[in-house]
Image (tube, rainbow, N blue to C red):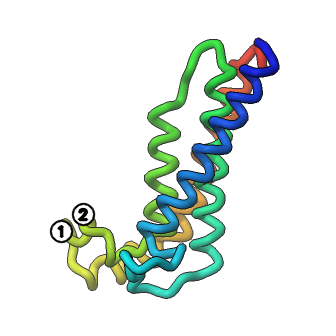
Amino acid sequence: MTLAGDRRDVLRGIAVGVVTFLVFGTVTGLIPNPLYVRMVARTPADYLFLTATSAFAAAFVYQRSLADETVGDGAATGGVLTGLLAFGCPICNAVLLALFSTSALMTYLDPLRPVLGVASIVLFVGILGYQRRRCTTC
């Protein structure tokens, strides 16, 4: 692989991380904006899980570009979605609100958000480790 290929892979990974952070941060209200009002308080854990999800998505995309055989796309998608549930506003999510009531989301989902964040991190660490072991060029 040439140096330009390596640089492109690194830049692609960084771009995925930055875009993930900005898009998810905006649509969850962690990055204040006039289009979206967050209905629950922002916590340091929310920012931690947003940053971790973005960083792991970037690392996954970079490492995937180096692998001979790509594995773990489904697990990475699950990690991103679990991370989104961890830092997203539970009562602002239209899909969850359509499925459950506001009181059910605040009673049952809100206390589980830190657990979902840890689960997301564990999922990403697992898939990155597995991918790393299988990669001959990493």
Front residue of 42/106: it is: 42
The residue positioned 41% from the left and 80% from the top of the image is 34
Q: Which residue is mark 2?
A: 95
SS for dot 1: helix
Name the residue at the right extreme.
3
Q: Which quadrant is the C terminus positioned in?
A: top right
Q: Is residue 42 visible?
A: yes
Q: Could you classify mark 2 by the number of other residues whose Cα lies within 10 Å: few (under 14), some (14-19), or many (20 or more)?
A: few
| Residue 91 in picture, x, y percent from top left | 32, 78
What type is the residue that disc 1 sits on?
Answer: Ala
Near-viewer residue (135 or 8): 8
Q: Which residue is mark 1?
A: 98
Most extreme residue toward the left is 98
Residue 136 in the image: x percent, y percent? 76, 14
Residue drawn at the location 57% of the way across and 58% of the way down: 21
Q: Are marks 1 and 2 in contact (CB under 8 Å)?
A: yes
Q: Residue at x 33, y 75 (%)?
A: 92
Quarter of image, res 108: bottom left
Classify residue 12 as left or right of residue 103.
right
